[in-house]
Image (tube, rainbow, N blue to C red):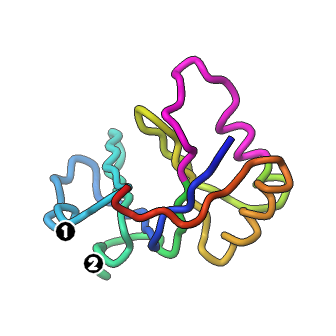
Amino acid sequence: MQLDRIEGRFAVARLPAGEGWPHWFTWARGVSAIVRTAQETSIFCEEHLVPTSVRAERGFVAYTVRGPLDFSAVGILARLSQALADAGIPLLALSTFDTDVILVRAERANDAERAWRAAGMWLDSVAEASD
């Protein structure tokens, strides 16, 4: 399994349930997402886009699994998360049609990379955020 580190810092913002598309998300490039549930709207994007008035957790680094991944593939997130769990590193995960995205706090990024390498997962150099 190969991982690519995405250039930049990311945030996960929380808006009230049913909140419309925020104007500041329009400028999101590269890896970004809006996820809605009955209880909340969560937004993942570059941290510099999120206004300081918006409730958010900032300071994440993002990694993508080099894909595309087949929908029948089993255990990809389990393997990634187990390596981090063994190292005591929390994560957030997102999935797209083609791949999985893992977010870790920037201050734990080097630890995460060491944990993944020790588990036999190869990391590439930083990829452009627009990839």
Count the numbered circles shown.
Answer: 2
Eyeballing the image, is 44 above or below 73?
below
Residue 63 sits in quarter:
bottom right
How crowded pointer 2 is (Cα within 10 Å; few <14, some 14-19, many 20+) is rated as few
Q: Secondary structure at mark 1?
A: helix
Residue 51 has which mark? 2
The residue at the point 19 percent across, 68 percent down is 24
The residue at the point 48 percent across, 62 percent down is 127
The residue at the point 67 percent across, 57 percent down is 123
Residue 105 sits in quarter:
bottom right
Residue 101 locus on image (x, y percent): 52, 49
- Whether 42 is among the magenta residues is no
Residue 82 sits in quarter:
top right
Q: Residue furthest top?
A: 72
Amino acid under label 1?
Trp
Residue 110 locus on image (x, y percent): 72, 72
Residue range (magenta): 64-82
Residue 24 has which mark? 1
Residue 116 locus on image (x, y percent): 76, 54
Q: Is residue 128 left or right of residue 73?
A: left
The quadrant the C terminus occupies is bottom left
- Whether 75 is among the magenta residues is yes
Q: Is residue 120 left or right of residue 106?
A: right
Labels 2 and 1: the sequence-earlier one: 1
How crowded pointer 1 is (Cα within 10 Å; few <14, some 14-19, many 20+) is rated as few
Q: Are marks 2 and 1 in contact (CB under 8 Å)?
A: yes
Q: Is residue 123 left or right of residue 69?
A: right
The quadrant the N terminus occupies is top right
Q: Is residue 5 left or right of residue 48?
A: right
